[in-house]
Image (cartoon, rainbow, N blue to C red):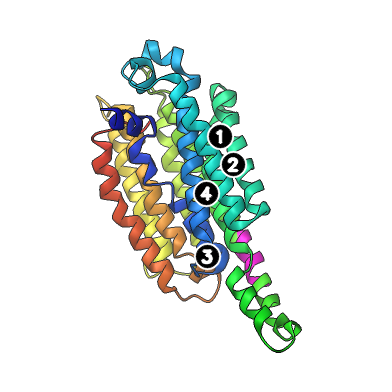
Amino acid sequence: MKLRAWLQLFRAPNLFTVPGDPLAGFLIATGGILDARVVPAIIASLCIYAAGLAMNDVIDTKEDLADRPNRPLPSGAISRSAAITAILALCAIGIGTLHAGLGPRSAVMGVALLTTVWLYNATTKRIPIIGAINMGLCRGLSLILGAIAGAGLDSTTIAWADALPFSFGMLMPYFVREAEQTNKGLVCATVAAICITFYIAAVTNLARHETKPIVPKLAKMLPLAAIFVGFTIIKLFTNAVFWDSSPALWLVAVMLCVMQTGDLLKTPPRPIPPAIGGYIRLLLVMQAALCVMPGNAYSGLKTLPSLLSAFALLSLVPLSAWAGKKFYAS
């Protein structure tokens, strides 16, 4: 029972969507190359995300007593002190992992992400537009965190270069090409992060109405509008929609979003909380599309790590849907 309460506190269905943000950012920044540097970024994103969810419930305990009394904190399944301890531990693990595994630059990015999470929970979530964009930034910065993790040269490569019997300067052309590719990758990752940011902002705006009797039609339509704009932007990286995996996968997400939106526009409409879970699950399809985007941004060819990462994320969709039947996602 205690485990179920913690899984509920951390929104178990949503956790499946977290690794895809830094993974996609890493692959975009490296041009489809995957190595061990992505691991600390994924661990940190999971820790900060989970800490943010627990932080949200700690801050909203009084409100949940009235509107959501069955949640872990107001029901007494998890004590407030235990939740605060978990938040502090997760934050320390997340930032510590970044610093130990990737260095101070990534740790600073992790602190920026954590600050954005705290700012949303403590202040901006009660401000309609600003709060929604703030939440979107939390997911967008998670993608950028992965890109920054991939932006530095692999420490193993540098170690081997230093061990070579000839001058390190002979390898400078290689590192210059690497830096040029990294800069291009960071630009592409930033564009991808903006797409994710505005989609999550639209979903957050919809979630604000989950306890209200009437939901504005515009709020129901915004997630579809945001994901379609994202498709238009991703399309700029390729000359074909159906013959390239990146925009084709994003188009699948658009079609699934059309179905979700149609359910909300029916009379009577679908309940908002399950719909929020469905919208968040679409992130897995969008992240898969971003994982195979580096081929468009660089050579036009897909790398095996990109394809395998996209497949792994898509395989999580049914698992997240199964968890969504047992735990709420908002």
Q: Which residue is mark 4?
A: 195
Mark 2 or mark 4: which is in front?
2
Mark 1 or mark 4: which is in front?
1
Q: Nearer the viewer, residue 258 or 184?
A: 184
Query: What x and y, as percent, mark residue 74?
Result: 37, 15
Q: Which residue is mark 2?
A: 113
Query: What x and y, as percent, mark residue 140?
Result: 54, 46
Identified by mark 4, the residue type is Cys
Q: Of marks 3 and 2, which one's residue comes earlier in the chain?
A: 2
Identified by mark 3, the residue type is Phe
Asked if the residues shown at circle 1 and circle 4 are in contact, with their CB atoms under 8 angstroms apart, the answer is no
Q: Which residues are magenta?
A: 180-187
Looking at the rendered structure, the secondary structure element under dot 1 is helix
Q: Which mark is residue 237?
A: 3
* Viewport quadrant of the N terminus: top left
Q: Which residue is mark 1?
A: 117
